[in-house]
């Protein structure tokens, strides 16, 4: 048994995670206290740069470089033009990506990373503002920076204090906080986010009503020259049959349709339409040009079209299969589709 193993107590994976969590708590306390104004200055600086069509350029070496790449990606996805620049490549021509007004954010825990220090004499001549994420406020990098954000940690999760762990976690969290704060300053909306994330499950959740609605021949509507007359849903027909029996077959659509169905404009996100349907307990929305019944019909959105955009949550079963089947066999007293129709004296729903 080595001397180190006799001296150092064994640490569980949970202990190591708690070490990193403690580093994040220290960072949060600094952001609420002594580092608050410095963070706000940096966030304002980046937001102003974006408004002036400038960018945030992230740089770092090793593990800090990987964190810098991720922060750049997060900035990009939240509306801030950003790019990663490797310091070594910068020294061999890639400095050309920097332009006056850009913000160069350098990540170095020690603040003495050789490849980054070689850039310090060039940055001022390029008209670029240097911001540093560092754990040493007296370092060469910190001294050369216009703005310094402290990512110091009491200790790394590595027992030998060699592998960057807690420190890179703090860097990543600070970068995320900066990206989101800048996003809020730029008033970056869910619709803007959707434009940058068209693929996969996230893209489907951020799809618009226009993208999912049924149009043309597949649009089941009651209309005249593009103007909405009413809507007739499967739930309406089912309840009519339950009430009137065979006599229901003698009624016309105009007799039983809802003349004032809920409508929606094509621009809202699909998740917003889903919220409306869930709140009103309906299964379809008529899409019109401005979201009112007075304008031309564009399509129909059905609840089934929104299943893929709904957040999926897995829940533990709270009843037996037999009990679930019994619930399914029960007839709901709530209208399930289309709209609400108060009963009238002639048997209409």
Image (cartoon, rainbow, N blue to C red):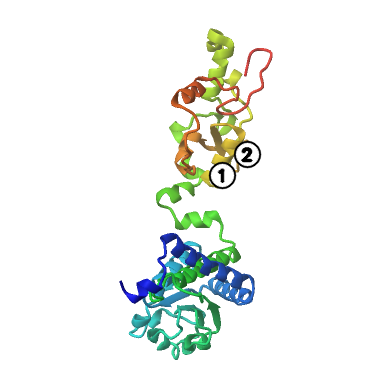
**Residue 265 against residue 229 in the figure, above or below:** below
- Assess whether mark 2 and mark 1 are in contact (beta carbons under 8 angstroms): no
Q: Check disc 2 and report its element: helix, strand or loop.
A: loop
**Closest to the observer, 299 or 1:** 1
Q: Measured from the top left, where is residue 230 in percent x and y?
A: 59, 28
Q: Residue furthest right?
A: 345
Q: Residue at x 50, y 46 (%)?
A: 208
Q: Residues within 10 Å of mark 1 (few under 14, many from 20)?
A: some
Front label number (1 vs 2): 1
Compared to residue 226, the image places residue 182 above or below, namely: below
Which residue is painted at 63% across and 39% down in the image? 292
Q: How many marks?
A: 2
- The image quadrant of residue 243 is top right
**Residue lying at the far left of the rendered structure:** 1
The 10 Å Cα crowd at callout 2, few under 14, some 14 to 19, many 20 or more, is some
Q: Is residue 185 left or right of residue 325?
A: right
Q: Position of residue 134 (x, y in %)?
A: 49, 79
Quote the CA–CA distance across marks 1 and 2.
16 Å
Quarter of the image holding residue 250?
A: top right
Q: Is residue 82 above or below residue 337?
A: below
Q: Position of residue 349 (x, y in %)?
A: 62, 19
Determine which of the numbered discs, if any, sits on residue 26 in the image: none
Q: Position of residue 215 (x, y in %)?
A: 47, 36
Toward the top, the furthest residue is 246
Q: SS of the residue at dot 1? A: helix
Query: Which residue has dot 1 on it?
Result: 272
Q: What residue is rendered at 46% in x and 73% in y?
A: 167
Residue 103, above or below 233: below
Q: Which residue is mark 2?
A: 292
Picture quadrant where residue 59 is located: bottom left
């Amino acid at each position: 048994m080595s001397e180190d193993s006799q001296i150092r107590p064994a640490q569980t994976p949970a202990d190591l995670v708690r070490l990193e969590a403690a580093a994040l708590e220290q960072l949060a306390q600094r952001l609420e206290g002594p580092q608050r104004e410095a963070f706000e200055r940096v966030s304002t600086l980046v937001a102003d740069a974006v408004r002036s069509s400038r960018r945030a350029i992230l740089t770092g070496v090793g593990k800090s470089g990987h964190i810098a790449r991720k922060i750049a990606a997060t900035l990009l996805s939240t509306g801030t033009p950003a790019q990663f620049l490797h310091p070594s490549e910068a020294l061999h021509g890639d400095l050309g990506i920097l332009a006056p007004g850009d913000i160069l954010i350098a990540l170095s825990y020690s603040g003495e990373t050789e490849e980054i220090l070689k850039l310090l004499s060039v940055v001022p001549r390029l008209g670029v503002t240097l911001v540093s994420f560092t754990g040493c406020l007296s370092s060469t990098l910190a001294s050369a920076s216009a703005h310094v954000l402290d990512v110091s940690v009491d200790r790394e999760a590595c027992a030998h204090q060699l592998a960057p762990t807690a420190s890179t976690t703090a860097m990543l969290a600070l970068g995320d906080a900066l990206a989101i704060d800048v996003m809020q300053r730029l008033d970056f909306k869910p619709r803007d986010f959707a434009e940058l994330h068209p693929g996969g499950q996230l893209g489907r959740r951020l799809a618009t009503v226009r993208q999912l609605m049924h149009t043309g021949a597949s649009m089941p509507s009651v209309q005249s020259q593009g103007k909405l007359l009413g809507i007739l849903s499967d739930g309406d027909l089912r309840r009519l049959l339950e009430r009137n029996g065979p006599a229901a077959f003698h009624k016309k659509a105009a007799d039983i349709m809802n003349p004032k169905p809920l409508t929606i404009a094509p621009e809202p996100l699909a998740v917003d339409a889903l919220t409306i349907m869930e709140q009103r307990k309906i299964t379809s929305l008529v899409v019109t040009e401005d979201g009112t019944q007075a304008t031309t019909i564009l399509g129909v959105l059905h609840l089934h079209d929104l299943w893929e955009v709904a957040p999926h949550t897995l829940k533990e079963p709270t009843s037996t299969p037999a009990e679930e089947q019994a619930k399914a066999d029960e007839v709901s007293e709530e209208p399930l589709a289309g709209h609400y129709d108060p009963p009238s004296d002639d048997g209409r729903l």
